[in-house]
Amino acid sequence: MDQESYKRRWRWLILSDESRVMVDEEDFPRLQQMNWVMRHSKGRGDQVVSMVWDSEKSRIVTRYLAREIIKTGKGYVVNRKDPDVPDYRKSNLIVCTRKEKERMRGKTRKATTSQYKGVSRRKDRKMWSANICVNDHRMYLGLYHREVDAARAYNDAARKYFGEFAYLNDV
């Protein structure tokens, strides 16, 4: 994280299960008035939500903590830059499209030939293949003798095509 984000003042927001997340001090008074819970999901990861009654719609609606902190227009979502940390400060939140959010996701399927996103084993050639999907088109990045080299090729392409929204393999 950059130096500026450490200078900002923040507070712990206590959730109903006694877990806690970091929020900016300026948002804390408004957010602490709601009952927040950690919702665990296999595909999406953990999300902090609040269920509230919407009298106009006559139903219960789900409010997401990140969206409550940063209001977005239609077609945009708020995502955490580092989803492994319970950090909902503005310095860790990013407004993006759903497509950009998907690009930030790590490897989703576990039962595959490689531990890295964008890499697969070519049994017929006994090599590793690197690929990336850009605008719904799969791009071939090459064959590599080592799995880690194919992962690096994916990382280079992800940086080039997705910029700040790129998920990078940990190599």
Image (cartoon, rainbow, N blue to C red):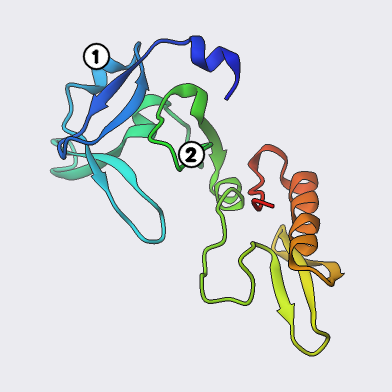
Mark 1 or mark 2, earlier in chain: 1
Rendered location of residue 139, percent (x, y): 80, 65
Residue 128, located in which quarter of the rendered image?
bottom right
Instruction: Report helix, strand or loop for mark 1.
Output: helix
Give whichever of 23, 53 is nearer the camera. 23
Tell me: 28 left or right of 147: left
Residue drawn at 36 percent across, 22 percent down: 23
Q: Residue at x 57, y 25 (%)?
A: 1
Q: Which mark is residue 59?
A: none
Look at 50% across and 29% down and name the residue there. Answer: 92
Place of residue 86 in the rendered image (x, y in percent of width and height, measured from the top left): 38, 35
Disc assigned to residue 79 = 2
Q: Is residue 154 visible?
A: yes
Cα distance in 3D space between marks 1 and 2: 22 Å
Q: Which residue is mark 1?
A: 29
Residue 138 visible in the current orientation = no
Asked whether 89 or 53 is in front, the reply is 89
Label 1 neighbour load within 10 Å: few <14, some 14-19, many 20+: few
For mark 2, give the secondary structure: strand
Q: Does the CB distance between marks 1 and 2 fall below 8 Å?
A: no
Left or right of 76, for residue 17: left
Kind of residue sitting beneath label 2: Asn
